[in-house]
Image (cartoon, rainbow, N blue to C red):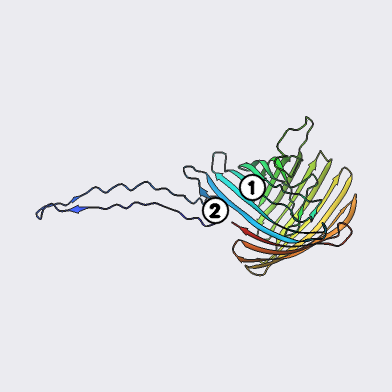
Amino acid sequence: MKKTLLTLLGSSAALLAAYSANAADAVVADAPVPPTGSYVQVCDAFGTGYFYIPGTETCLKLSGAVSFSAGNDTYANENFAGAEAYLDIDTKADSELGTIGTKVRLSSKNNFDTYYVGGNPERTTDVELAYVTVGPVYFGYKETLLNTDLFYGDFDLESIAGDLNTTTIGVLQKGIYGGVYAGVALETNGRGSFFDNNGRFGDDYVPDVVGRVGIDEQAWGGVDLSGVYSDENDAWFLKATADLKASDAIDFRLAAGYGDTDGDKGYLVTAAGKYKFSDKFAAFTGVGYFDQDSSSDYVAANAGVTWTPVTNLDVTGQLTYSDLKADDDYNTKVTVTRKF
């Protein structure tokens, strides 16, 4: 959202009076002092959208989205329609310890479909994010460090240890050398709800250990390797992900993962592509194969088109396919999203 600097200015006037026709010098009245101004000042040190909180050196950014979705899901054998919204509150400030930031996301988001690998991971319907960053260190309630990206569109990966968000403490250092980054985190394995993640743990409780290393912000894209070990589930999972740019208009995403949950082994391979026809139209598609010892192997795929008639207003039509239940199941959905 474009910010405007509002300034209240007073005007001063100089009065010049001649006391007589023969006076050698003019007498100038003292100019009145302008009134003190009140304003909101743009803060461009941390990117677009930030402004200084008046009277402080802390920068604040408000952003979010409201969306409406409607469609049909044969997997759940139902039609669905609903609205979702979230509000992001971000702050940043420089300090002797580096940049200190906070992020809070208030969310009403729910999933209206069930096409998620491993289940249906609700990202929570209250406080979706609430964490602090001090330089590369972060702590609070945050999305997992594990890379969960699979297809473009809605398709996402549920980690073997639970849902996507977790109470965590970790470090993610970017720019180690060029675009190289690396991170490690401890994450609670009671995932998926902000309030469920704030409480007491038993004496023998062991948090999940998650690591990630990769390279990004290259002309050709980026790659990473991430993994998680969960003592609670006696489970581990490794995933390699590549986001590649073939041109300014063409992107590809390739992923492969392998894991073991108490002797139950499984793996996945996926490939997805996105093509930008213009500033207003883009299309995406993807396909993946998933296999686990304890369940039947299955194929999932999606395809969709996004129309952006004006900036920050997206209309997306998406078709998702899966034979997870040994039947051909489809999810058709149209979503209108306004970001701000």
Image position of 8 (left or right of 257): left
Determine which residue is flagged by label 1.
106
Badge 1 local density, few (<14 within 10 Å), some, or many (20+)? some
Amino acid, disc 1: Leu
In the rendered image, residue 97, in percent from the top left (x then y), is placed at 57, 39
Image position of 35 (left or right of 158): left
Question: From the viewer's perspective, is residue 153 above or below residue 55?
Answer: below
In the rendered image, residue 287, in percent from the top left (x then y), is placed at 80, 62
Badge 2 local density, few (<14 within 10 Å), some, or many (20+)? some
Camera-side residue of 302 and 276: 302
Frontmost of labels 2 and 1 is 1
Quarter of image, res 100: top right
Image position of 73 (left or right of 178): right
Instruction: Name the residue at the bottom extreme.
Output: 277
Image position of 257 (left or right of 106): right
Circle 2 SS class: loop
**Considering the image in quadrants, where does the N terminus appear?**
bottom right
Question: From the viewer's perspective, is residue 133 above or below residue 178?
Answer: above
Residue 176 appears in view: no
Circle 1 SS class: strand
- Residue 235 is tagged as none
- Marks 2 and 1 close (CB-CB < 8 Å): no
Amino acid, disc 2: Gly
User: Residue at 50% of width from left, 45% of height from top?
Assistant: 53
Camera-side residue of 58 and 310: 310
Say whether disc 2 or disc 1 marks the residue closer to the N-terminus.
2
- Number of labelled discs? 2
Residue 165 appears in view: yes
Determine which residue is flagged by label 2.
49
Between marks 2 and 1, how big is the CA–CA gap? 18 Å
